[in-house]
Amino acid sequence: MKIVCAYSGGLDTSVMVHWLKERYDAEIITYTGDLGQGDDLDAIRAKALRTGAVRAVVDDLRERFVDEFIFPALKANALYEGTYPLHTALGRPLLAARLCEVAVEFGADAIAHGCTGKGNDQVRFEVAAQCLAPHLGVIAPLREWDLTTRELEIEYAVERGIEIPVTLEKPYSIDENIWGCAIECGEMEDLWAEPPEDAWRMTKDPRTVKLPSREIIIGFEQGIPVSLDGEMLPPVLLLEKLNQIAGDYGIGRMDMVENRVVGLKSREVYEGPAAVILVAAHVELERVVLDRPTSTYKRRIADDFANLIYDGLWFGPLRHALQAFVDETQKHVTGEVRIRLSAGRYIVTGRRSPYSLYDDGLATYSHGDTFDREAAAGFLKLYGLSYRTWGGLQRKVGEHPSE
C-alpha cells in the first residue's frame, strides 16, 4: 500500500508517519506545501525522511496561495463571524488539491491528513478530496488511534525517538501562513485565561510598542492590493512587508469564541497583521466606488462567502458562482487608502479613486453646493407615501402608534 501523507513537521504529522507505517505496513510519501509559514523546507524534507517516509515532496505555494485563494477572499471581504480572516481555512483547499495531485502522480492508494475528529480541517481536506479525486481513500489517524490527547502523542513520540517541536510545558498547536497564524491548546482552552505572551508569533505586545504613529498608503487595482507607500510590489512581498510593519505595532491580534463546523464552540486565538489592514482598506475603498444597492448586497454575501470557505466548500459550485459576482463588483475598486498605525490600533485617514462616486458639489454644505434642495420635498412625499397611508388608517381605527 502507498499513502501520501500531508506533513508539516509538527507533532501530529510527525507521529502520523511512524503510526501509518506500523498500522498499514505502507510506503509513506509526505507532502509539504509552503504557504509562507516561515519553515526551513530543506529541514522539513530531511526530517520527513528521517521519520520514515520513502519520499518527501515539498512545494513553494506562496504565490499561488495569494493569487488564487487569499486575494479572491479579500475581494469578498470574507471574515468568518465578522472577525477571522480565514487564513487556515483558505490554505486547506490548496494543500488538499496538491495532496491529491501528488497521490495521482505516484500511484498512491490513499491520502492521509492530521486533522482531529472535532476540528474543521478534516471537513476541508476530505470534501476537497471528494471533489477532486473521489477514487482515493482517505485516512485520518487522529480519528483512529488511541493517542487521544496531545500529552499521549508526545509520550508516543518520545518513546520512539520521533523528533517533535513541542513539549509538555509548552503544548501549543500553531498553524501559520502568509495570511495569518492560529494558536490553540494549553491554557488558552480556559475562556477566562489571557493568551500567554509567548504564544504570539507575528505581532509585538501592543502594551510595549514604543514606535511613533505612522501612516501607510495601500494601492489597489480592481480589488487587489498592488502597492505599499507608492511602491509597486509583487503580492507575496507586499504581504510580507505589511505583516512586518503592522506586526511591529501589535496590530492583528484576535481572540474569539467561534462556532465550528461539527457543532461545538471553540476558543480561537489568531494573528493577521496584513489581513486586518488589507480588509479594512478594501472595505473603505469599496465605500467610495460602489453604488449603494451593490454595496449593500455585497455586504450580505460576505458572510455567505466566508462561511463557504470555513465549511470547506471552496471547490463547490456556490463559491464559484459568488466569486463571479464578487469579481464583477471589483472592476472599479481601484485607488489608494491611507491608514495611520499606532500601538495596537489602526484608523483610515484618507481614500481616493479615479472611480469615486463621491461628488464634492453634492456633498458639501459650503460654497459650491449643487444639490437641488427643492427636489427633496417631492422625494420625501413619494418616499413616505405608503407610511402616510398606513398612518392615516391607524389613526382612523384608533390604533395610532404614538398613542
Image (cartoon, helix red, strand yellow):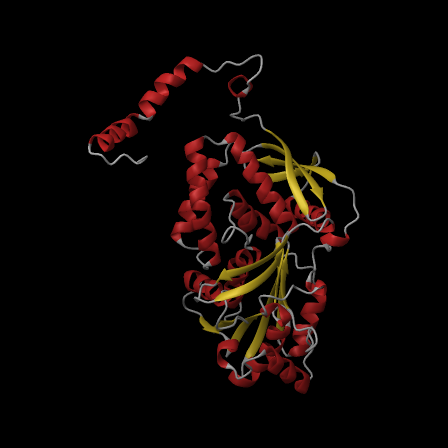
- Residue 176 left/right relative to 81: right
Q: Nearer the viewer, residue 279 or 131?
A: 279
Farthest residue, direction bottom = 159
Q: Nearer the viewer, residue 178 or 264?
A: 264
Q: Nearer the viewer, residue 138 or 311?
A: 311
Q: Tell me which corner region of the image, top left, top right, bottom left or bottom right, holds residue 352.
A: top right
Q: Residue at x 52, y 77 (%)?
A: 141
- The answer to whether residue 229 is seen in the rendering is yes
Q: Residue at x 52, y 30 (%)?
A: 289
Above/below status of 194 relative to 360? below
- Residue 394 left/right relative to 250: left
The location of residue 339, given as percent across then percent down, is: 66, 38
Q: Tell me which corner region of the image, top left, top right, bottom left or bottom right, holds residue 342.
A: top right
- The answer to whether residue 59 is seen in the rendering is no
Farthest residue, direction left = 397
Q: Residue at x 33, y 21 (%)?
A: 381
- Residue 107 left/right relative to 210: left
Q: Residue at x 57, y 62 (%)?
A: 268
Query: Count of labels shown?
Result: 0
In the rendered image, the quadrant that contains the C terminus is: top left
The location of residue 89, given as percent across then percent down, is: 53, 58
Q: Nearer the viewer, residue 208 or 1?
A: 208
Above/below status of 400 relative to 257? above
The location of residue 217, given as percent across then percent down, is: 68, 36
Above/below status of 12 relative to 391? below
The location of residue 385, given as percent across then percent down, is: 29, 25
